[in-house]
Image (cartoon, rainbow, N blue to C red):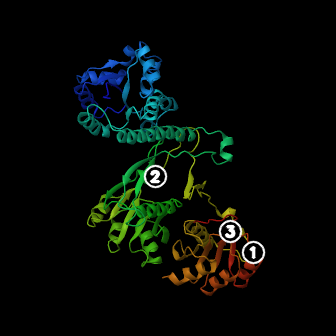
Amino acid sequence: MAIECALISVSDREGLADLGAGLRELGIRILSTGGTGQALQASGVEITPVSQYTGFPEILDGRVKTLHPRIHAGILARYDRVEHTEVLKEHDILRLRLVIVNLYPFSETVSRVSVSLEEAIEQIDIGGPTLIRAAAKNFQHVTVVVDPADYPDLLSELGTSQGETSRITRWRLARKAFQHTAAYDAGISEYLESINSPATDEKELPSTITLSLGRQETLRYGENSHQRGALYGSLGRPPSGLVAATQLQGKQLSFNNYLDLEAAWRLTTEFEESCCVIVKHNNPCGAALAEGPCEAYRKALACDPVSAFGSIVAFNQTVDGETAEEMRSLFVEAIIAPAFEQAALDLFSKKGNLRVMRMGPESPAVGASRERRFDLKQISGGYVLQDLDVARITASDLEVVTRREPDETELRDLLFAWKICKHVKSNAIVYVRQAQTVGIGAGQMSRVDSVKLAAEKAQLAIEGCVMAGDAFFPFRDGIDEAAKVGVRAVIQPGGSVRDDEVIAAADEHGMAMVRTGIRHFRH
């Protein structure tokens, strides 16, 4: 049964004129709403206004246009049921077997930093999702199209199939339609969740999480070359962070590149001083503070220059030409920073495959409260969710538990080491001297093995450095091993049943030890 009448109501007018002309050439009548109808008429396409067909005007500033029985009965009728067909005839209702609708640009609207709540609410489409859902529900008889990219194939199939579409096409388009409305509603939910949350809501994690993600680009591959990969960004909020970063040059990014870029950048944001972080396989292999990015890079690289080969390098300040010149001899996968001087970009451009990323803006505060930020990981059958680990400490938060207190230099290094340790995979041990990592032990099943590994990997002298551990020392062996390589002070959470034994070991070795009272496991 050929399609005789189509309903068109779209916010995205891409391809609309060609679509309308093609449908009219096929003899398909078009019902349309205000703005869409005017655009079609302006391009010379004859339409019947919905208000003329229903006998009811658009009202409430356009909030009510298509919410009418003559519209929805024509979409929802089952044409394999005689009683449905008789009802349509009795009330002179057209068979609306082609519904072409896309929705108000809610996500685009709320992506503007200055958008008001009132503006956002007016972009919540009511009639559109209702039309789409009705047509998709009745896909056995109705074709629903939400994406202008599908217009050419639709016209082609209608032209070669006597004005009809196949069940396979209708099923595919119905699935796409429900994805469209689901993402739209999720974007609204996410936006509303991010603003003016009552204080009581902050006491618990959300009872439900609705993800609204749009694919930004297809990646070169996933974690390995046989796996597919893609980058998705949140809908319903302004683009921000790494997803909104600008790639200034280089090859397309891979799945692993994004993970390492995020790890490196997040660590640099712990500091206001000029910081450089070098990351390999999601772990820092060098980090340092200095007066400028060039010196910070030199110090970070000195920690583990072997592991730095093929790494990701992050800076928290503008990268200048001196820094770029210093980096010329090292092969790295990508560099990320808030900005780059032209002299640096000119030098980097000589390495065509090097990915250079200018970081996107952080997520702004929306409404009266900061947006909530969570860490979400998939497990079989579901997800686990937690707050992001944004806990920070100062010297006043530390408890000195040994006879010797750390001196001023040791205290600064302990706080620096603690921030680095937070970003190292557990079990994590970090050796530091003068705001420079000296050795890093990551991802070991035993804490004492991490202590040994950090010493084994050290390229610089360890004698006199400080040590950070991301969780308590369960036995004194970790302290004893640290003493063998000359560690002078330790920062750790405390909380072991053997804390007294661990503290006694530090006293025996003349170490200073401070406890933070919080841990930083990172799995």
> Which residue type carries mark 1?
Asp
Q: In the orientation shown, which residue stands out farthest toward the top?
A: 55
Q: Which residue is mark 3?
A: 493
- Residue 428 drawn above or below residue 1: below
User: Element under label 1?
Assistant: helix
| Disc number placed over residue 221 in the picture, else none | none
- Residue at the spot 65% in from the left edge and 39% down from the top edge: 198
Total numbered labels placed on residues in the image: 3
Query: What amino acid type is highlighted by mark number 3?
Result: Pro
Residue 298 versus residue 359: which sits nearer the camera? 359
Image-quadrant location for residue 497: bottom right
Label 3: few (<14), some (14–19) or many (≥20) C-alpha neighbours in 10 Å: many
For the point 35% across and 62% down, the residue is 320
Indicate left or right for 197 with 72 as reference: right
- Which corner quadrant holds the N terminus? top left
Q: Cα distance, mark 3 to mark 1? A: 10 Å
Amino acid type for the residue under numbered disc 2: Gly
Query: Which residue does the numbered mark 1 point to in the structure image?
Result: 499
Q: Which mark is residue 241?
A: 2
- The numbered mark, 1 or 2, whose residue comes first in the sequence reads 2
Sequence-first tag of 3 and 1 = 3
Q: Secondary structure at mark 2?
A: helix
